[in-house]
């Protein structure tokens, strides 16, 4: 399986996927940390994360996959949502919470 197939499989078989630097428990950059916090504040307690620092092929492949130059990258129900700034903007206007609820990703509060 090539890297694009691996990425496609990851984003389509998990409702919420975050490609990030580090892990949700130990983010390795401020943007990844912010992305994790936004998901948590949106009511998502579990999501699939990929630490791009562990695999250079995934790190470059994900940028190609979405045609998006930066990490983190969020996918919901197989669709690319955006990076940290887009996540923040969508969170602030309530769009992200609605998208996650529609995806069945939010846990009961």
Image (cartoon, rainbow, N blue to C red):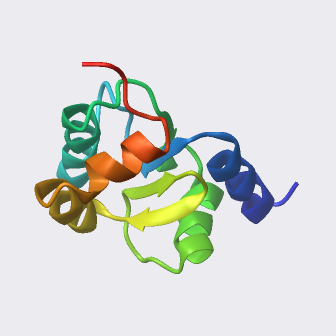
Q: Where is residue 41 in the image (x, y as percent from the top left)?
A: 18, 35
Q: In which quarter of the image is residue 109?
A: top left
Left or right position of 40 against 5 = left
Q: Which residue lies furthest to the right in this view?
A: 1
Closer to us: 73 or 54 = 73
Regarding residue 49, the answer to whether it shows in the image is: yes
96 over 65 or under it: above or below? above
Closer to us: 46 or 62 = 46
Q: Residue furthest bottom?
A: 67
Residue at (38, 61) in percent of width and height: 71
Q: Position of residue 76 (x, y in %)?
A: 50, 52
Q: Where is residue 103 in the image (x, y as percent from the top left)?
A: 49, 44
Q: Which residue lies furthest to the top in this view?
A: 109
Left or right position of 100 against 75 = left
Q: Quadrant of residue 44?
A: top left
Residue at (42, 55) in percent of width and height: 74
Q: Which residue lies furthest to the left in this view?
A: 92
Left or right position of 43 against 10 = left
91 over 43 or under it: above or below? below
Residue at (53, 80) in percent of width and height: 67
62 over 107 or under it: above or below? below
Residue at (57, 64) in percent of width and height: 62
Q: Position of residue 100 (x, y in %)?
A: 39, 45
Regarding residue 21, the answer to whether it shows in the image is: no
The count of marks equals 0
Closer to us: 77 or 10 = 77
């Amino acid at each position: 399986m090539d890297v694009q197939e691996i990425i496609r499989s990851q984003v389509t078989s998990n409702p919420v996927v975050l490609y990030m630097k580090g892990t949700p428990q130990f983010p390795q950059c401020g943007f990844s940390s912010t992305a994790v916090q936004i998901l948590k504040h949106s009511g998502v307690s579990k999501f699939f994360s990929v630490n791009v620092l562990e695999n250079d092929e995934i790190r470059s492949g994900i940028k190609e996959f979405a045609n998006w130059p930066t990490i983190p990258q969020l996918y919901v129900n197989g669709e690319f949502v955006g990076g940290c700034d887009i996540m923040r903007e969508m969170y602030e206007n309530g769009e992200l919470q609605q998208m996650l609820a529609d995806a069945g990703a939010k846990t009961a509060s």
